[in-house]
Image: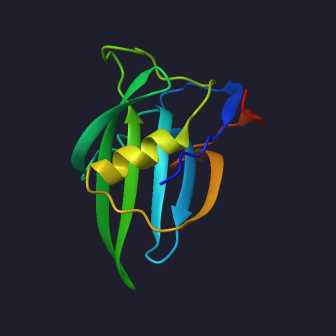
Amino acid sequence: MEPILGANPAGDYKKADIPRYLSVYGWTQDPFIDYYVIENFGTYDPRSGAKRMGSVSCDGGQYELYEYQRVTWDGVQRQYFSIVVVNGTQRTEKRTGGTVTTGCHFTAWEQNGMELSPLDFMIVAVEGYWSSGQATIRVDSPP
């Protein structure tokens, strides 16, 4: 898959210990797979219940790769995650700014048996679970 440069997000993201993600989020079509490149997360562990598929180094940080499958009303839904490693050998902090080279993650997923179908949608997302708050995120053109 041809590398795609994702986003250069920066901004104010409250770091309270609440269940939340700061990520590049998107999905593919036929089959539908939604995916996350998680740069920052709170108390909710996105690895819970997911299968570890490998690891990759992208944009100066180490990421663990996970696949999660859940049964929904219309079948099995797959989710792919690249989750930043905290206290790893490279970048040692979750981050709220910088460049996310999504092609690096897409290539790593495919190399680790995580099949990708045609891309459909991609955003920089802040998700909260059973929480409240705010985030101001700016997405710039690639450097």
Q: Which residue is drawn at the image coordinates 43% and 23% (left, top)?
A: 61
Image coordinates of residue 92 in percent, x first then y, are: 40, 14
Q: Please give the name of the residue rendered at 39% of the width and 85% of the height, measured from the top-left corner.
A: 74
The percent coordinates of residue 29 (x first, y second) are 52, 73
Q: Nearer the viewer, residue 27 or 13?
A: 27
Whether residue 135 sits left or right of residue 129 in the image: it is: right
Q: Is residue 118 above or below residue 17?
A: below
Is any part of residue 19 visible from this angle? no
Q: Nearer the viewer, residue 77 or 53?
A: 53
Residue sitting at the far bottom: 74
Question: Is residue 83 toward the left or the right of residue 8 in the image?
Answer: left
| Count of residue discs | 0
Please say whether residue 52 is visible from this viewpoint: yes
User: How does the figure colour the protein chain or chains?
Assistant: rainbow
- Closest to the observer, 15 or 75: 75
Q: Residue at x 46, y 72 (%)?
A: 32
Q: Nearer the viewer, residue 53 or 107?
A: 107
In percent of width and height, residue 108 lies at 36, 44
Q: Is residue 123 above or below residue 18?
A: below
Q: In the picture, residue 54 is in which quadrant?
A: top left
Quarter of the picture holding the C terminus: top right
Query: Residue 80 location in percent, x, y?
Result: 38, 54
